[in-house]
Amino acid sequence: DAGVIQSPRHEVTEMGQEVTLRCKPISGHDYLFWYRQTMMRGLELLIYFNNNVPIDDSGMPEDRFSAKMPNASFSTLKIQPSEPRDSAVYFCASSLERGDIQYFGAGTRLSVL
Amino acid sequence: DAKTTQPPSMDCAEGRAANLPCNHSTISGNEYVYWYRQIHSQGPQYIIHGLKNNETNEMASLIITEDRKSSTLILPHATLRDTAVYYCIKTNSGYALNFGKGTSLLVTP
């Protein structure tokens, strides 16, 4: 398996624009996680899905953020409208079962100007 | 839910053992200790985990004290590629990983 695949690797956008980050989990994994990493706050869990259903979105910072998982092999994290403080590295991870090892993608580095 | 405590940074000579400590004095009976690392510009990578027994795999060894209040990750023969930030995490569910600030390990030639 190719592992967790995220796209794009880098995204530069202007304040107010919509940003969509994409993730393909490892095939067969039932859990998918979205994290954000900043210098100030470190790695934070934003939301996680089980069998394509959002289970806990308490980490989503505000209504400008939304995440979907339309099928077992694809998830998106959308920011609309984007703000400079959203600049961070966003990671997607997947695991086979709850409590199992999480496998991370290479991340998307987002810069909002 | 208090996080774990790790030294912010450590150095290790290449070829020597790297011993990374972690304090988790508030750990409860059903919480595991997980170790991940993050090499610069990459996503976190799982290393090893344990409940109360010492564990070893191809990457590292995990030594957990008898009272489970602390543990040590051992990289037996550190290489330059082991330079990374190492995170010690305690969790009872596995999904909610509080990464904290970790230990920045620098392996020097």
Image (cartoon, grey):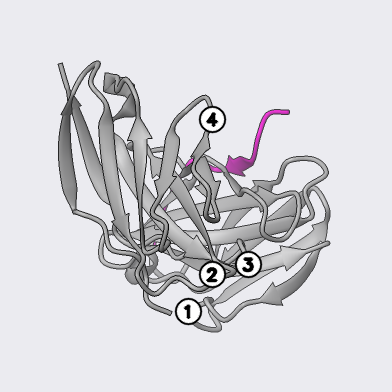
What range of the chain is rendered magenta? A1-14
The amino acid type found where label 4 is placed reads Asn
Are tags 4 and 2 found on a single chain? no
Q: Residue A99 carries which label?
A: none
- Find out whether the residues at labels 1 and 2 contact each other: C-beta distance under 8 Å: yes
Are tags 3 and 2 found on a single chain? no
Tally of numbered discs = 4
A11 magenta-colored: yes
Residue B108 is situated, as x and y percent measured from the top left of the image, at 15, 23
Q: Mark 3 points at which residue?
A: B93
B49 relative to B78 in the view: left or right: right
Q: Name the residue under label 1.
A: A61
Q: Distance between the residues labelled 4 and 3?
A: 22 Å
B40, above or below A49, in the image: above
SS under mark 1: loop
Looking at the image, can residue A13 be seen?
Answer: no
Q: Distance between the residues labelled 3 and 1?
A: 22 Å
The amino acid type found where label 3 is placed reads Ser
Are tags 3 and 1 found on a single chain? no
In percent of the image, x 28 and y 49: which residue is there? Answer: B21
